[in-house]
Image (cartoon, rainbow, N blue to C red):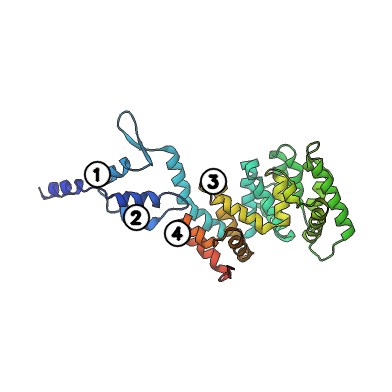
Amino acid sequence: MALSNSNSNANALPVASNEIEALTKALSGFGVDEKSMVSILGKWHPEQKKSFRKGTQFFVQDERLFERWIDRHVEQLKHEFLRLKSAVVLWTMHPWERDARLMRDAVIDGPKSYNVVIEIACTRSSEELLGARRAYHALFDRSVEEDIAYNADGVERNLLVALVSSYRYEGPRVHEDTAKSEAKTLVSAIKNALKKNPMEDEVVVRILSTRSKLHLKSVFKHYKDISGKTLDEDVVAPSSLKHTVQCLSTPHTYFIKVLDAAMNSGADENTKEGLTRVIVTRADVDMRVITEEYHKQNGVALNQKIEQIAKGSFKDFLLTLLARGGPIQLKK
């Protein structure tokens, strides 16, 4: 009899609206607020869980009055629970393996992820890129070049293969006359882009994929002197060519664009993954510079933005990686 009274009292307990709101928030967005989720769900009785199903966006009631999870919310929640795991796994990998696996996933994913291949090919040193290619061999028993050549279609194929095959000179020498001549070549190619896609131009591909980054810096300077605009400004619409130019000319600005896109409320899952990728891969490289530039461009600190949009242990891990470079001197 005592047990019956206890159940009756438990079943009579309503779910406080603030608990429903708190749990909905804990299960929405980047990552999961594990602490709030456990503290709320762990004490609920069956009738309280029923109230949650009726009062939240995650469930639907069919014509038989059956309350079930909406499929897209189930899939989304799976992704959110996996974010911390994915970030930790990427962080603990050798950088060569990490880049190899990121490139492999991007190649399989297709054109919407080719920017990841370009990002790795253009922002790593020659030795780092060579190491990633060796790791790719070891992991997948083939080369990244042949995978791209097989999977990529259209005009992007030659540029992508050339970029990942590159072993750029990293010394101080720059031939200014050559840089100026190559800038003129790029200006001409961009002006005639409607007649011929610049990615189909072997000379354009050769310049972007083989020249040292110091040499390209001079090329891009001469380009602006001739054109009146930067090459990035002149290349229309997001494309492999535009991503290549951004990664080679202003990599920190490129990374900030990836972060902004990832933290946009309407971002798809593929775009959202950029947040983890950039912070994990740049934490020990140039995250301090990225953070300072982010504040300069957006007027808000990157760690504050992550505090706003991320949750739980995933948020804590990202903030820990951001802090590895020490305190950031933010200019007001």
Quadrant of the snapshot with the C terminus: bottom right
**Is there any visible trace of residue 3 in the rendered image?**
yes
Crowd tier of the residue under label 1, counting other residues whose Cα lies within 10 Å: few below 14, some 14–19, many 20 or above:
some
Asked if the residue at tag 3 contacts the one at tag 1, i.e. Cβ–Cβ closer than 8 Å, the answer is no
Out of 69 and 127, give the one closest to the viewer: 69
* Location of mark 3 (residue): 267
| Image side of residue 256 versus residue 166, left or right | left
On the image, the x and y values in percent for residue 151 come to: 68, 39
- In this rendering, the answer to whether 8 lies above or below 97 is above
Q: In the picture provided, is 32 more to the left or to the right than 127?
A: left
* Amino acid type assigned to the residue bearing label 3 in the image: Ala
* Position of residue 81 in the picture relative to residue 62 (left or right): right
The residue where tag 2 is placed is: 38
Whether the residues at callouts 4 and 3 have beta carbons within 8 Å, the answer is no
Kind of residue at disc 4: Ser
Q: Viewer-nearest of labels 4 and 3?
A: 3
Residue at 58 percent across and 58 percent down: it is 298
Marks 2/1: CA distance? 17 Å
Please give the residue where the numbered disc 1 appears in the rendered image: 47
Q: Please, which residue is most extreme toward the right here?
A: 177
Q: Which residue in the structure is indicated by mark 4?
A: 313
Crowdedness near tag 3: few (<14), some (14–19) or many (≥20) residues, C-alpha within 10 Å: few
Residue 152 relative to residue 54: left or right: right
Q: Amino acid at mark 1?
A: Glu
The quarter holding residue 135 reads bottom right
- Amino acid type of the residue that numbered disc 2 sits on in the rendered structure: Val
